[in-house]
Image (tube, rainbow, N blue to C red):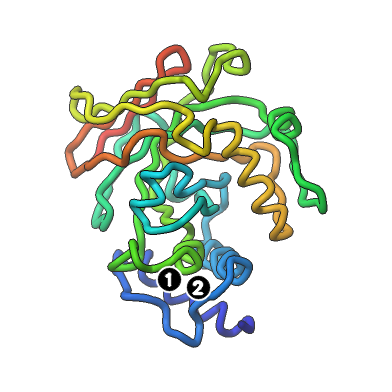
Amino acid sequence: MNQAQIDKAAQILWNAWDNGETISELPKDCRPTDRQTAYKIQKEVGKLSRSSQIGWKIAATSVNGQKHIGVPGPLAGRLLADRTKMSGDTLEVGANLMGVAEAEFCFQLGKDLPPRNTAYSIEETLEAVDTLHTAIEIPDSRYIDFVTAGETQLIADNACASWFVLGPPTTADWRSIDLGDHKVQALVNGTIVEEGIGKNVLGDPRIALRWIVNELSNEGIGLRAKEVVTTGTCVLPFQIKPNDYVELEFGQIGRVSVTLS
């Protein structure tokens, strides 16, 4: 696919996102058939947003997440500053096709992880981490039928990114905590609606972090100090609607909340 086709796909996707619209699929002449091309389109979508990038997200790290969007494995996407809120904020969710929220462990990097020819280990990726945060993701898709869109079209569509809510850095000694066995509760308007555990994201949020570092490295993309990486939902995506108060409890690691309008 040439640059003109990449640009065409990106413009279609960004127009849909910016206008709160959906499409059935990308036209055949600019529909990506491989992950490399899909990530190139995603990059151009980010440019069209004119928003700075604060980090990365991983979609479909859990079996439930993969079923939710009809893909066999995880996908990487970009987190945009203009679509980011802090814990306790109010968020106008607007027209959202998916209508769900997700509970996530999120790492902030303290140093760069540049692309390279050899894979990064878990130890190397963790050495680059500065802080651990709780986070809420409210995903969405620009495709009417996102379950059948396929992984390359979903990657191009920024891996179902929409809104992101970042919690404060934990004060707990998180490096000594078994994140895979750590329990999480999701509450809507004070009622527990879902419960999960860290191992639901590729076996451990730290494994998910390594996955995205190496996935992006294979595409010639590095991660930078101060960027955050949210590692995918550790609970079944749960239904939300305007006027809901969404809160995630991560025990000693902390909590994160958002009010929807």
Quick check: 196 left or right of 28?
left
Q: In this view, does 88 lie to the left or right of 161?
A: left
The one nearer the camera, 39 or 17, is 39
Q: Residue 221, relative to residue 103: is it above or below?
A: below
Q: How crowded is mark 2: few (under 14 residues within 10 Å), some or many (20 or more)?
A: many
**Could you say where residue 124 lies in the image, as x and y percent from the top left?**
76, 33
Q: Position of residue 249 (x, y in %)?
A: 35, 21
Categorize mark 1 by other alpha carbons within 10 Å: few (<14), some (14-19), many (20+): many
The disc label shown at residue 198, or none: none
Q: Do the residues labelled 2 and 1 touch (CB within 8 Å)?
A: yes
The C terminus: image quadrant: top left
Q: Which mark is residue 10?
A: 2
Q: Which residue is drawn at 31% across and 41% down?
A: 237
Residue at image position (34%, 26%) is 248
Q: Name the residue type under label 2.
A: Ala
Name which residue type carries label 1: Leu
x, y percentage for residue 171? 54, 13
Q: Could you say which is closer to the camera, residue 85 or residue 31? A: 31
Which residue is at 19% across, 22% downward? 190
Separation (CA) of disc 2 from disc 1: 5 Å
Quadrant of image for the N terminus? bottom right
Quadrant of residue 209 within the rendered picture:
top right
Q: Is residue 187 left or right of residue 122?
A: left
Residue at image coords 40%, 20%: 183
Q: Mark 1 points at which residue?
A: 13
| Residue 143 to residue 188: above or below | below
Q: Name the element at disc 2.
A: helix
